[in-house]
Amino acid sequence: MTIRRAVEGLALVAVATGALGVVVHYLGPESNKLILLSSFVPLLVVVGIAGTLVLAAIRAWRSALIGLLVVLAGVWTQLPLFVPSRPSFPDRVAGEPITVLQANIRLGEADAEGVVDLVRQHDADVVTVEELTDDAVVRLREAGIDELLPEQYLKPRPEGGGGTGIYSRFPLRNAEPLGRFAMENLVADLEVGDGRTVLLAVVHPMPPYPEPAWRWAAEMEKLGVLLRERASAGTPVIVSGDFNSTWSHTRYRSLLTDGFVDAADQTGAGLLLSYPADTVYPAMIGIDRIITRGATVDRPARVDIPGSDHHGLVASVTPWFE
């Protein structure tokens, strides 16, 4: 009997862990610890599922019913990422698909030839790069990226993770920083032909940990304001980068209004976990993301970036024009 009670107690703790995941998914706290927990909501829900199964196995039916309700609430938080919700644009005309490759290159230390090989392999039209350093710019050039993607807007930094860059097959116009942030966030118009342009933003807001949580929250809110200001009516928008946020952060989901849609949400591609990529255990959170407005996404997929602590993302984005 004592063993049964101990097992039930541990299972209830697991269910409570799942419930905590549901709470932090919706609360949007400005606490470093709770924001960190928000990053792992899918894992917390899995713990809750395990606890519920144990309660059912020992026939603690009332507790198992509570666990089932927690599990259903937890699954509901992640369900949009697994159920396609493709936007439609009946009054617009589809342009040619644009293949976007998102790559955080870990303080500029990733294998430049490996990155360029990914460009060739996926026939990328645009590459968005974070943690770009002066040395990485040189190594990417030596690896042949200039021949593949000659149009560039680069804001590297000598060291650290603050540099950002755009490599493009399309001409870039009106390229400039997207406001003032701790790290470089960039914006440019892609001239995709026939007089049409697509607004491209490459983002890298500061992480919520270990910096004070309010700084991350302020940058995420500022990012949303600036993206909406830039997204003029009728212009398709692609936003790609290391958001330092997951689906379960309310401030990330607050970006997904006024027509902005997450690529995984559009396609049902799932969690697309991208970090960390340099450990013995698999990536646990999805902070590298692509969102669009006035565009549809096909085949978003995770790719390996040799030498980086992030996986990359590649997706085919079809802009729709008025």
Image (cartoon, rainbow, N blue to C red):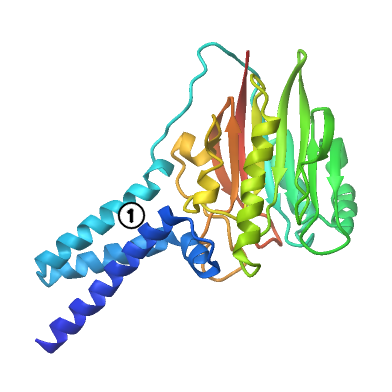
Which residue is pictured at 57% across the width and 55% down the height? 274
* Side (left or right) of 163 relative to 5: right
In the depicted view, which residue is nearer to us: 178 or 194?
A: 178
Vertical position of residue 277 compared to residue 112: above or below: below
Q: Position of residue 307 (x, y in %)?
A: 71, 62
* Side (left or right) of 225 relative to 113: left
Task: Say which residue label 1 marks.
Answer: 74
Vertical position of residue 254 compared to residue 63: above or below: above
Number of labelled discs?
A: 1
Image quadrant for the N terminus?
Answer: bottom left
Q: Of the residues shown, which amino acid type is indicated by label 1?
A: Gly
Q: Is residue 124 visible?
A: no
> Which secondary structure, mark 1?
helix
Specify the quadrant of the image occupied by residue 74.
bottom left
* Side (left or right) of 251 relative to 270: right
Q: Residues within 10 Å of mark 1 (few under 14, many from 20)?
A: many
Which residue is pictured at 11% across the width and 65% down the height? 62
Specify the quadrant of the image occupied by residue 118.
top right
